[in-house]
């Protein structure tokens, strides 16, 4: 077996979703850091079909979209399954919710300070265009995003009562999906405070973060 090439950004939450699964499966990868604007390598490896990260290349096969990569890798390497028998639909539903509902307020809370700290006008313009909102508009919605985040964090915390992982057994794709927004939130210690009091969530967050 050749190397797994992972086209990624180090701080990309969607890449982190996949990295948690690779760690769980004991698979090593070669990280290929991509550029937010220059998509040459992504277009080359995907035959012009995809410009987002993560993209995984292994032995000449190329797969993209984090959930699709996780499903693919779980079929290819069945040991230490991330999707338990009979749980694919549930994992996919949780993944959609995590990517589209849970991640949204976190993205909009974290990005303005991230862009301000980077101090790069080109990066700011690029990310504002991608998200479809200015940093000022994101800041104006901060109180509402904070409220949504606390609501969602409480739901997750409730489900994690008495459990090490979200579906109640070992680590699954559901944990990777739900973890990635908190990985992104943790880049911003001020906003991370919003979830610190959720003790079940915090223990689970550390467990997934520290997977070996
Ligand atoms: N549905 C995709 C979403 C991937 C995605 O949006 N990745 C972000 C980085 S976290 C990205 O590449 N955005 C476009 C860009 O940075 O130019 C997946 O799950 O892989």
Image (cartoon, rainbow, N blue to C red):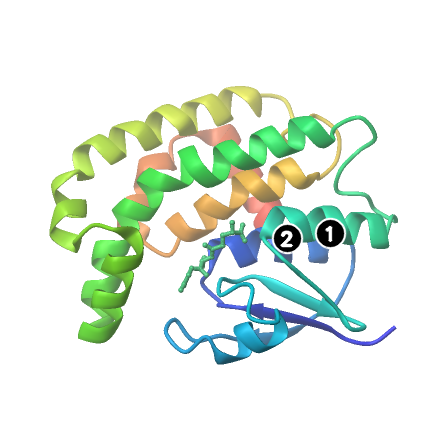
Q: Is residue 17 above or below residue 60?
A: above
Q: Is residue 104 left or right of residue 112?
A: right
Regarding mark 1 in the picture, which secondary structure is present there? helix
Q: Is residue 114 left or right of residue 184?
A: left
Query: Is residue 95 something that shows in the picture?
Result: yes
Check residue 20 in the rendering and tell me which mark sits there, or answer none.
2
Q: Which residue is mark 1?
A: 24
* Cα separation between marks 1 and 2: 6 Å
Q: In which image quadrant can residue 119 be found?
A: bottom left
Check residue 102 in the rendering and tell me which mark sits there, or answer none.
none
Circle 1 Cα neighbour tier, 10 Å, few/some/many (<14 / 14–19 / ≥20):
some
Q: Is residue 72 left or right of residue 12?
A: right
Callout 2: CB less than 8 Å from ligand 1: no
Q: Is residue 40 above or below residue 90?
A: below
Q: Position of residue 71 (x, y in %)?
A: 73, 46
Between 90 and 206, the one lying in front of the other is 90
What residue lies at 27% left-to-right and 66% top-to-bottom? 126
Regarding mark 2 in the picture, which secondary structure is present there? helix
Q: In which image quadrant can residue 163 be found?
A: top right
Q: Are marks 1 and 2 in contact (CB under 8 Å)?
A: yes
Circle 2 Cα neighbour tier, 10 Å, few/some/many (<14 / 14–19 / ≥20):
many
Single out the residue that lies furthest toward the front.
48
What residue lies at 83% left-to-right and 46% top-to-bottom? 80
What residue lies at 66% left-to-right and 48% top-to-bottom? 68
Q: Position of residue 182 (x, y in %)?
A: 45, 45
What residue lies at 26% left-to-right and 34% top-to-bottom? 146
Q: Is residue 136 above or below residue 143?
A: below
Query: Is residue 164 something that shows in the picture?
Result: no
Between 7 and 145, the one lying in front of the other is 7
Q: Position of residue 160 (x, y in %)?
A: 57, 25
């Amino acid at each position: 077996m050749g190397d797994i090439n992972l086209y990624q950004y180090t701080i990309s939450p969607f890449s982190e979703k996949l990295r948690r699964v690779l760690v769980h499966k004991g698979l090593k990868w070669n990280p290929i850091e991509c550029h937010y604007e220059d998509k040459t390598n992504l277009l080359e490896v995907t035959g012009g079909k995809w410009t987002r990260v993560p993209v995984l290349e292994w032995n000449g096969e190329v797969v993209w979209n984090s959930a699709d990569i996780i499903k693919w890798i779980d079929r290819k390497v069945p040991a230490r399954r991330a999707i338990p028998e009979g749980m694919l639909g549930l994992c996919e539903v949780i993944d959609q919710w995590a990517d589209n509902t849970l991640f949204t307020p976190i993205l909009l809370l974290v990005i303005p300070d991230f862009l301000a700290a980077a101090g790069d006008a080109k990066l700011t313009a690029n990310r504002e265009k991608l998200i479809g909102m200015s940093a000022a508009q994101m800041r104006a919605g901060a109180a509402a995003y904070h409220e949504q985040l606390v609501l969602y964090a409480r739901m997750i915390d409730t489900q994690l009562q008495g459990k090490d992982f979200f579906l109640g057994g070992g680590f699954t794709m559901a944990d990777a999906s739900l973890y990635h927004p908190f990985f992104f939130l943790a880049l911003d210690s001020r906003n991370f405070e919003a979830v610190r009091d959720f003790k079940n969530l915090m223990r689970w967050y550390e467990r997934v973060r520290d997977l070996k």
